[in-house]
Image: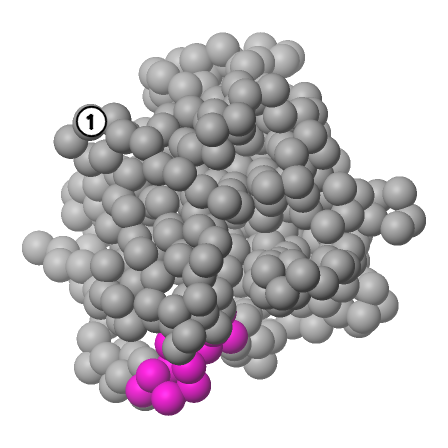
Amino acid sequence: MSKIVVVGGGAAGLELVTRLGKSFARGNEHQVVLVEPASHHYWKPRLHEIAAGTFDDELDAVSYLQHAYCNRYQYVQASMNALNRSAKSIEIRNVNGELSTLEYDYLVMAVGAVSNDFKTEGVSEHCLFLDSALQAQQAWDRINPLLRSQGEHRISIVGAGATGVELAAELAKVSGKLARYRQDTKLTITLVEASDRVLPAGPECMSEKVAKALTKLGVQIRTDVRVSRAEQSKLVTENGEIIGADLQLWAAGIKCAPWLAELDGLETNRLNQLKVDATLRTTLDDAIFVLGDSAECPQPDGSFVPPRAQAANQAAGHLASQLKRMLKGKTIKPFVFNDGGMVIAVGHDYAVGSLLNNKLILRGRLVRNLYDTIFRLHQRILFGWGRVTALVLLKRVKGSLNPFYKHNIS
């Protein structure tokens, strides 16, 4: 019997242990362990909804403890502290700060990535981030008082990638809906991007449609603007311009946590991503695999798998099947990413999508439904279609009874 330890309960890690737990449970063949410091799982592409106060944590959050019981894997609430490759063990720290050792036969790193501040002065002290549910909740704790108070308030968001765009749109929608509550409150949202367009990683025609939708919502878009430093209640650009704000959020670029570069000699790149071969194995240790944004995985054309949610989900499904092959003594196959396009939510009732290798750009409410469907497909892996159908019905009932902005304003 082999022991597979998965570090990180994001979308990729949780989907992996779900598949493996179900596969191995019946014959009690192998042990699957998930190491994750949080108590609940939140789908990362929806963290902006937590920050904006529109996320339904009653229906869309997943308890690791309950899910582990239902899917026959072990959940350890702890964070990884160190790696000992020769002993095949990791050091973990639980929520009380106590250290212990956890042995493995195979280790899967699925810890994801965080925002890249590019060592910009003052960003870590004066900007909020959306790299985890905890950080998103902290952002909400700062945004909520602004929504409850009278007058105009300014919010600056640095980075017009998917996270920055979706957060700006969600906050603009919330601000617009406040009129229903007869609140004399308005958010002025400024989206700051160093490139010459929003969504610089996407096709230009998609960027144009998203920019028009954001402008219609009242978001002020500032492109070709580089932030040289952040200070209390203001951003300072390279040309000396001051962009004032009551609240500042940073959503520009990605990198991996520095501790990944200190894992017992494993190879990493300049972004602290762990280098793997085409089978998702680390270059220096065949017993360690890496999933998602924390992996630098080569592709047949010489490129690398992009740090996107769909890539992580595909890798999780691939690795689940390949680990099962490997444990049966079969050769594992390389992972090849199949780009299914990009869908960006611009508020709760509108989205823009790029499909068929950017040959087809769609927009509107139906595309927003496609965005929600992607989330439901993630839930389907975790729960099965029966529970997902029940969740969809419950959410529609709640939506018809509750206001768009779910938190109390008085």
Residue 179 in sight from this viewpoint: no
Residue positioned 20% across, 27% down in the render: 98
Can residue 387 be seen here? The reply is yes
Q: Which one is nearer the viewer's eye here, 100 or 168?
A: 100
Q: Is residue 102 magenta?
A: no
Q: For this view, does 288 lie left or right of residue 170?
A: right
Mark 1 surroundings: few (<14), some (14-19) or many (≥20) residues within 10 A? few
- The image shows residue 384 at horizontal and vertical percentages of 42, 81
Residue interval drawn in magenta: 377-390
Q: Eyeballing the image, is 342 above or below 365?
A: above
- Residue in the picture at 43% in, 86% down: 385
Which residue is drawn at the image coordinates 48% and 68% (left, top)?
Answer: 19
Q: Quadrant of residue 174?
A: bottom left
Q: Nearer the viewer, residue 125 or 350?
A: 125
What is the count of numbered marks?
Answer: 1
The majority secondary structure of the magenta stretch comes to helix
Q: Quadrant of the C terminus?
A: bottom left
Picture quadrant where residue 390 is located: bottom left
Q: Label 1, on which residue?
A: 97
The one nearer the camera, 357 or 385, is 385
Residue 48 at what x, y percent from top left?
Answer: 41, 51
Residue 257 x/y as whole percent: 50, 27
Along the viewing direction, whichever of 186 and 372 lies nearer the viewer? 372
Say what amino acid the circle numbered 1 marks. Gly
Circle 1 SS class:
loop
The answer to whether 259 is drawn above or below residue 288 in the figure is: above
Residue at point 35% right, 70% down?
A: 71
Residue 134: give x, y in percent of width and height: 29, 41
Q: Please state if 35 lies on the left or on the right of 394 as rendered.
A: right
